[in-house]
Amino acid sequence: MTAFSIVLLAMIAAFLGMRLYSVLGKRTGHEQEPVLPRRDERPAPAAAPVRLDEGDGASTLPAGLPGGSGLVYEPSAEAGLRQLLAADRNFDAGRFMEGAEAAYRMILEAFWSGDRDTLRDLCDDDSYEGFVAAIEARDARGETLDNRLMGVDSAKIAAVEVNRREARITVRYQADISAVTRDADGKMIAGSMSDASQTDDLWTFRRQIGSSDPNWLLDEVEAA
């Protein structure tokens, strides 16, 4: 798997808020740092660890998250989910989405703060290397990010692929993020803390079916 195609390269020339675009491209000095590096400029990010709890072996599709309303998946993902449930009877989509939402926040905050240890735990090798490259480029410019995840409006499984013994799940996140880039003196050079931008991104996590490791790794991030 090559792309962020999730924790390192997954999390600038005019994006105002924070979606995916180059962190390594040319800058005029006031472009907004992206929420995550652009997919074509980074290795694939590994997904944050999402633990699968033991299931009861049922192959029925989940209705929604505990205490929530609506489905945890989009209609286009139903066939893939059924295929995954047939291959891994312990898979629980509701539990997965609880972990995927936590992973989303952890990966974003780790990238923004430059927390390499957390990224290492949540990403595959390519993704991690991509994130580190973006962090190092930011550090070399003497810049820091003062970003805030204001809230996740929606998070649903958008696609599921089962290939041989590997499963890949794509989650669509719609969230509000406020972003500010500061220079070495702490002066704001881009963004705004008063205005949040709405993002609509697709994060793909992967895991080997039957593996003793229950964690899912971020494999790819792209704008929807």
Image: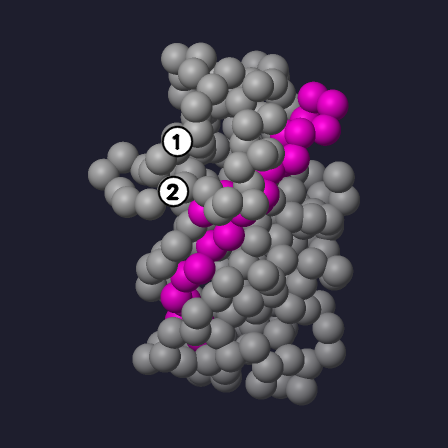
State whether residue 36 appears in this view: no
Q: Main secondary structure of the magenta part?
A: strand
Q: Is residue 43 left or right of residue 91?
A: right
Amino acid tagged 2: Leu
Q: Is residue 101 above or below residue 20?
A: above
Residue plotted at (56% across, 72% down)? 33
Location of residue 148 in the rendering, given as x and y in whole percent from the top left corner: 38, 64
Residue plotted at (50% across, 84% down)? 189
Find the distance from the CA under tag 1 to the CA under tag 2: 7 Å
Residue plotted at (67% across, 29% down)? 162
Region of the chain picked out in magenta, as a range: 156-180
Pick the front one: 88 or 139: 88
Q: Is residue 33 above or below residue 62?
A: below
Amino acid tagged 1: Pro
Residue plotted at (58% across, 85% down)? 30
Tag 1 residue: 62
Q: Is residue 67 magenta?
A: no
Image quadrant in which the C terminus is located: bottom right
Residue lying farthest left? Answer: 67
Tag 2 residue: 71
Mark 1 and 2 residues: CB-CB less than 8 Å, in contact? yes
Q: Secondary structure at mark 1?
A: loop
Q: Residues within 10 Å of mark 2 (few under 14, many from 20)?
A: some
